[in-house]
Image (cartoon, rainbow, N blue to C red):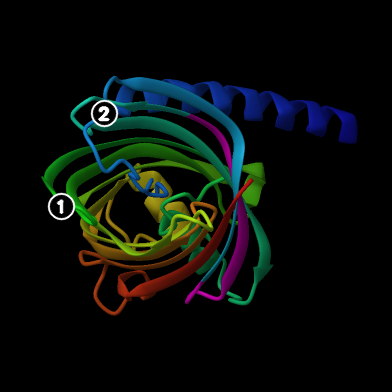
Amino acid sequence: MKAKKKKKKFKNFGILFVGFLLLTNLTSAQLLEIDYSKDKREESSVRVHFIRQGIIGVSSLQHLDLSAEIFKVRYDGKKDAHLSFTVFSTQTIWKGNKTDALNTFSFLMNPIGGTVNGTFFASYPISKAEISKSKVGLSLGTKWIEGQPLPGFRSSTFFDTFSRLGWIHQRLLAEDALQNTSLYFWSYPNLVVHRSSQENRALFFNDELPSLAYGYGLELGLEYNSQLKLILIGQQLVNATPESEFGKFVLRLSLTYRF
């Protein structure tokens, strides 16, 4: 009996994963990439990375998790345009909140959250100085989220498609060429949109979150020596049901190490 259940669960995972790949290709946290180039690029470049970053994060929803950047392909153009597709995976380490729906909501509000997360990211420069740059940034993606257990052996997973659009500003705070060290700061105020089926909103969020949920966010970050990042993200969905827990401002602090 247990073997049958495991086989069925594996089969469902395979179907969901294939569906995830299709959805990301159809719809297109991204962790922002600092652009270190000071001069105009001589030529465009395409790079591929595997298992490049580890991220530990904690949110004001009392949720501690661990994420990994599994795969990334990026394109950097001559005019500083940037395109990338990244696959993340996030797993829970500790749930301090006893409410299942809020623990699921923590994955929703994490730009790189979800058991599998595929994100397309694009940015285009609008201004450039010697130690600073400003860009328009857009991310589009799909998350496969493992929610709270449901009665009647119903699937506890669902998809959430999302996007962030905003203005990115990065600035070099300190640099020591002899020691090959640097410290960068960035900010990313943005508009946020999340979409899932009404059925999923009812099952996992008690019908207190609309199928199309939208709001705003602000991301602030420090990057030391192109290897260590400290990131603070604040977000709020403004069209949740009044007095709902899902309409509160959510803070998230992450520490990222690049291998």
Residue at point 64%, 30% (across, down): 13
Amino acid type at mark 2: Arg
Residue 250: x and y, percent? 38, 72
Q: Which residue is mark 2?
A: 41
Residue 230: x and y, percent? 48, 66
Could you tell me which quadrant the N terminus lies in? Answer: top right
Are the residues tagged 1 and 2 within 8 Å (C-beta)? no
From the viewer's perspective, is residue 140 above or below residue 101? above
Task: Indicate left or right for 237 with 157 as reference.
Answer: left
For residue 120, which quarter of the picture? top left
Q: Which residues are magenta?
A: 59-72
Return the disc, 1 or 2, that comes first in the chain's sequence.
2
Q: Which residue is mark 1?
A: 129
Amino acid type at mark 1: Ala
For residue 100, which quarter of the picture? bottom right
Task: Indicate left or right for 215 with 14 as reference.
Answer: left
Q: Nearer the viewer, residue 227 or 124?
A: 227
Q: How many discs appear?
A: 2
Q: Residues within 10 Å of mark 1 (few under 14, many from 20)?
A: few
Residue 29: x and y, percent? 40, 49
Task: Indicate left or right for 7 with 108 as reference.
Answer: right
